[in-house]
Each structure stands twice: as C-alpha cells, then as structure tokens.
Image: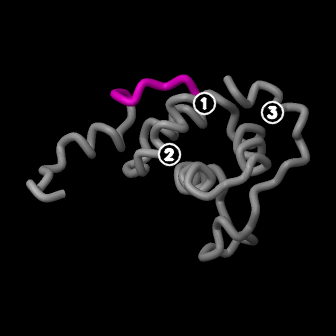
Amino acid sequence: MFFKDYKSHHKAQIRESLLWEYDLKNFNWQEMRSVVIQRVIERGRLDDFYAILNLYGPKRVKESIKQIPYLNLKDLSFVCSVFNLEKENLKCYLKQQSTIQHWNS
C-alpha cells in the first residue's frame, strides 16, 4: 500500500474546507465515513489521506471505497492503484458499466 507509513502521520487532520457544508462541531465522523472518504479521494491532499487512514483504518477505508456510488475515471484509477483494488469490485465502476451510453458521447 502506498500509504503504509500512515501511522507516523498521526497528527494529520482532514481539512475543514473539504466538508464545508457540514457543521463539524456536531459532525458524526463514523456515520458519515463514506462522504468523508469520497471527498478526500476527489479533492484531498496527502495529509487528508493520512488522516482518513488514521481515523478509519486501511480496511474500513477500502470497504468504503468499494461502496462509493460515483468516482470519475481518474479517481477510480487512482484508488485502484494506491489501495490495490480491482475496479470490477467497485460500485462506481459497475454502475458506470450499466449506464447506457449515447452514440455521440
């Protein structure tokens, strides 16, 4: 795993700007895990990745990634490479495959 040294970055925190529309004083980090992980994948910096790995652990992060309903192709490739996942096991990939494409798209 690319982030195998995440435990040495225990002071890393998720930037509040990633979750700008939520009240973080009353935010349930465990209940909103999939939202947090998706935001970090889409817009996060290195410290944000370290923070989610410390907060949720690699196993729970991988399981949450598998359940994310949408990721663009760049982010999809990134998480598959970094977290050693198969794209066929991701909900966003399967959902994308079942969407009918128009001829001119």
Q: Is residue 15 or residue 24 the one in the foreground?
A: 15
Category of crowding for the residue at label 2, using alpha-carbon neighbours closer than 10 angstroms: few (below 14), some (14–19), many (at least 20): some
* Lower position in the chain sequence, tag 3 or tag 2: 3
Numbered label attached to residue 82: 1
Q: Callout 3: helix, strand or loop? A: helix
Classify mark 2: helix, strand or loop. helix
Task: Answer with left or right where residue 3 lies relative to residue 35.
Answer: right
Q: Are marks 3 and 2 in contact (CB under 8 Å)?
A: no
In the picture of the structure, the residue carrying the numbered disc 3 is 6
- Residue at the image point whose x is 50% and y is 39% from the top: 65
Which one is earlier in the sequence, the residue at label 2 or at label 1?
2
Amino acid marked by disc 3: Tyr
Residue type indicated by callout 2: Asp
- Give the image quarter of residue 19: bottom right
| Residue receiving disc 2 | 75
Q: Dividing the picture into quarters, in which one does residue 24 lie?
A: bottom right
> Which residue shows up at 45% across the image and 41% down it?
76
Q: Amino acid at mark 1?
A: Val
**Vertical relation: 79 (above or below) 103:** above
Q: Residue 47: image x %, image y %?
A: 79, 48
- CA distance separating discs 3 and 2: 20 Å
Closest to the observer, 59 or 45 = 45
The span shown in magenta is: 82-89
